[in-house]
Amino acid sequence: MKYIKHLMLSALVLASFSSCIDDDTEYTFTPKSLVTIDNVSESAITEGESVTVTLTVDKPFKETLDFKLEMMSGGDNSDYTVGNDPTDPNSATTADDGFGSQGYLVQIPAYASSYTFQINAVLDLDVEGTEKYTFKLTNTRNGQGLINGNNIIKFDVANYTDDNMGLRLSWAKDESFQYLKENVLLAIDNDTGLEYVYTDDDEILSDTKDLCGVVDFDVFLDNANVFAYTGDCPEYVITGSAVPNANNTEVLADGTYQVIVDMWDFDLNFDDDESLVGGFAVPLEIEIAKTGQFHTSISYPSLFFSYSDVSTPNTANGQKLVATVEVMGGKYTVYNNLGELVAQE
């Protein structure tokens, strides 16, 4: 009898299962768009030039298709930018946005059947041979688009050279420090309505800031039209970067030139009741070059300090010599601020 009951129960379960299978509900799935690297405009360029990449989409999608372009070999993020205007490139990806610290986001607009973007080889001061850049394009974020076939982009980048003076001043550093918080407080007596001042225990607090956001350095040559007063960190003097009254370079005639660094401003953005405890050095590095032909650098770990004089608003109190450049027959000889030989072309 138990056996017969088990058979009947099994039959009911099978019937129920069959009714589920015979359900007439239809499920639809939207296929992902396939994106093809259709064309790479150049196989070889020079620093400062761009390669145009054309992507085609087999099924235009109603939303943006997100991809990440990442350099696999030949350099790093500082060697290239992505964007159709080299002077205003896209922002690089960061660890905070979830895409990693190396690469750029490439976004195909909604409903687009094709899209082009530029990879811009950055012009630098380095003396180097031809570099072979290799990139990988992968889907990311919404995952609605897939790369169809090859996802590798390759091209060569030749070194750019000219006779213009080049400078690069950098001082990026995360600096930890302590500061005094004076707890002098103003209060009102609720009974009398009179104001009175009372003090609490002062506090010693700690903080860390990037010196790029604390110090504003400028750099210039004393008797040449070579300077950078942009407010950027680093300050950069190189061919193609000229901005009236902010940045310029030129070919140096034979002669002797002093490279001056000016601490224009220093600001920890303290409140009125806050002050720095002690002090700290502001390390910097100055690179001196003839673009793509000669390059050297000098580091100064303690030439400037948190308590050094500054030049703002209109003094020269923050200026210090960092190098002397002698030019003879167009060739450079560089000395540090003590007159010691650093490098010779």
Image: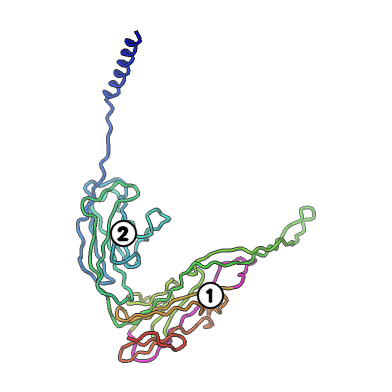
- The answer to which quarter of the image holds residue 242 is bottom left
At which x and y percent is residue 217? 47, 76
Residue drawn at x 23%, y 46% as measured from the top left: 59
> x and y percent of residue 239 in the render?
32, 77
Towards the viewer: 153 or 248: 153
Q: Amino acid at mark 2?
A: Glu
Residue at 25% over, 41% down = 31
- Of callouts 2 and 1, the N-terminal one: 2
Q: Is residue 308 left or right of residue 113?
A: right
Viewer-nearest residue: 345 or 28: 345
Label 2: which residue? Answer: 70
Left or right: where does residue 148 sit relative to residue 206? Answer: left
Vertical comparison of 226 with 115: above or below? below
Q: Is residue 43 above or below residue 146?
A: below
For image coordinates 31% across by 53% down, the residue present is: 67
Q: How is the image coloured?
A: rainbow
Q: Which residue is mark 1?
A: 281
| Residue 130 point in image, percent of width and height | 24, 72
Are the two marked residues, 2 and 1, in contact with CB atoms closer than 8 angstroms?
no
Asked which secondary structure carries label 2, the reply is strand
Checking the image for residue 197, the label placed there is none
- 4 magenta-colored: no
Q: Can you say whether 108 is above or below 131 in the image? A: above
Q: Mark 1, residues whose alpha carbon is within 10 Å: few (<14), some, or many (≥20)?
A: some
Quarter of the view holding residue 276: bottom right
Quick one: quadrant of the C terminus? bottom left
From mark 2 to mark 1, how far is it between C-alphas? 36 Å
Q: Quadrant of the N terminus?
A: top left
Magenta range = 251-278
Quarter location, residue 226: bottom left
Q: Residue at x 30, y 83 (%)?
A: 163
